Amino acid sequence: MSETALRVLIVDQNMARASILEDGLREAGYRDVIVVRDMQNLLHRILAEEPDVILIDLENPNRDVLEQMFQVSRVVRKPVAMFVDRSDRGMIEAAIDAGVGAYVVDGLRKERVRPIVETTVSRFRAFEKLRNELDETRQQLADRKVIDKARGILMKERGISEEEAYELLRKAAMDANLRIAQVAQSVITAAGLFKS
Amino acid sequence: MTPRISGAEGRVVTVGFMPLLDSALLVAAHEKGFAERQGIRMRLVREVSWANLRDRVAFGHFDAAQMLGPMVVASHLLGQRGDAPLVAPVALGLGGNAITVSRPLWQAMTQHGAELGAPPARQASALAAQIAVRRRANQPPLTLAMVFPFSCHNYQLRDWLQGAGIDPDHDVRMVVVPPPMLVEALRTGQVDGFCVGEPWNSLAVDSGLGTIVATASEIWPQPPEKVLGLREEFLEQHPQLCRALVRAVIDAARWVAEPANHVELIRLLGHSRYVGAPERLLAAALEGRIVPMAGAPPLQRPEFIQLNEAATVPQRAHAQLYCDQIARWRQIAATAQDVERALQSFRPDLHAAAVAEKLDAVPASRLSP
């Protein structure tokens, strides 16, 4: 059996991340990749698919379900938590840091599992990075809207220029040790109070 | 002001917990300053699975964590392939679990003599009768859930079943379902009943989906439950810090045991950072007022959960009970040597030392930030 013939099962309720992960493993040559999103039939799927390696998001409470399943399983090949083999501490720490849990069929050689876990970990990180960037962009966009609105209010109320209004907000934020958007939000809130 | 054990000196101690009523001592130790008074800066991290807590303690992400007592024992029984060996220097309470069945199953059980508040043995007999009815009708076995293979929930449920002649490995299907998914699993009929800690039984009752048929303290007298688990290695490296941590938990237990503090405690636990359940349900469970079914008057179960100093002793007898249960249900075939090590993992000596130590009286002004 070649290295890439291992059957890998991914348990992830996050569809976007699961597909990024699936693509990554396929690019690395693993053809036998199964993604399970439906938690209700998790046990049946795992029993039916007989994977060699199971990858699960550590934020998924179903990890405890897997633990029980492998504890009682006497008929199917018995996977064990990757964390049990602590000889490869570096890899396992990287996995926990990235939020990846792994279960492998007992007796499977570490060298065969390692590249799978490494691919998963790097894909999880790439996904996190993407998500953080997206959050940041969203935040920036939201901030910009708030700042623009507050600047408009200041320009109108105080008859100052755009630049002066921005400078006023910036200075107030610095003095109060707040973000400019936070000060801008206060301006909007206060203006709302004066209006009504 | 509690005097402080020297040696902890402002170190950050990261402690994992699960959103359960018996996280109370850890939450109080942190929120009410008992940890700080021991020179510990406690960082509480909420987790979603027992397996995560175990692994994060094993790899040093967490210094300690709320754990199921049997998890600590099991860490010594797996021999070469084992997890990091854990120790329990302090317990986090007694009791707090209950068995809940779905309303349809309860309805059927009442045909065989089950009654709200009846002794657990009678409820179990009614269940046995219903299982016999189902078997004759060629219906699939009932599915009962618990929270982790190495848990008191598993053993209490099994004891309750076997007391009525129900074989938990053949007459029913036993599965693990994470607590946050239990109510939904009951609603969709994926499970017919479960054994879990609070507030999850009360939530099932409150949503009209379940009936509580027994509490843990009716099945096992003074039932042991969670402990603070940490790595053996961590204990060896930081004995003073561990002692300070144990002391902080004991001080927290004294505070939690005062009924006058319950309103404040419940308000803390109700916060989404911690348990995040309705305060009225947490308060009722804490005070042993168990509403068995929506609309029914509460049953008085004063021993339902005990969160006080006496309940923080990690007793050897508890470790023995877990070893017996693990062997009885054939979970692990352990060597006598491993069992001996497992028994030693519960450390009443460390608990006693933390209580008895002549504490350094350190003025509050010298406390680390």
Image: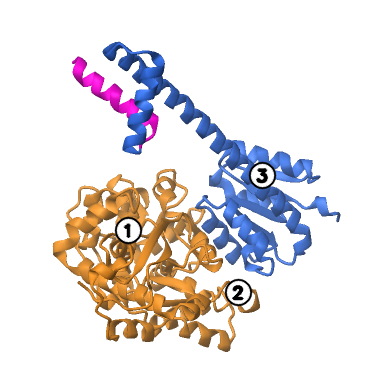
Chain colours: A blue, B orange
Q: Which residue is mark 1?
A: B198
Residue A123 is labelled as 3
Tag nearer the camera, 3 or 1: 3
| Magenta extent | A178-196
| Rendered location of residue A185, percent (x, y) | 33, 27
Q: Quadrant of the N terminus of chain B?
A: bottom left
Q: Residue furthest left?
A: B260
Under mark 2, the amino acid is: Gly
Q: Are marks 2 and 3 in contact (CB under 8 Å)?
A: no
Q: Is residue A137 left or right of residue A19?
A: left
Under mark 1, the amino acid is: Glu
Comparing B214 with B272, the one in front is: B272
Under mark 3, the amino acid is: Arg
Which residue is depicted at the point 39% across and 59% down?
B44
Residue B211 lies in the magenta stretch: no
Q: Is residue B162 above or below residue A2?
A: below
Q: Which residue is mark 2?
A: B82
Sooner in the amino-acid sequence: mark 1 or mark 2: 2
**Chain of the residue on which disc 2 is drawn:** B
| Residue B292 visible | no
Bin the neighbour count of mark 3 within 10 Å (Cα to Cα): few under 14, some 14-19, many 20 and up.
many
Quadrant for residue A102, please give it: bottom right
Q: Is residue B26 above or below residue A171?
A: below
Q: Quadrant of the C terminus of chain B?
A: bottom left
Q: Is residue B129 above or below residue B315?
A: above
Which residue is depicted at the point 54% across and 68% down?
B58
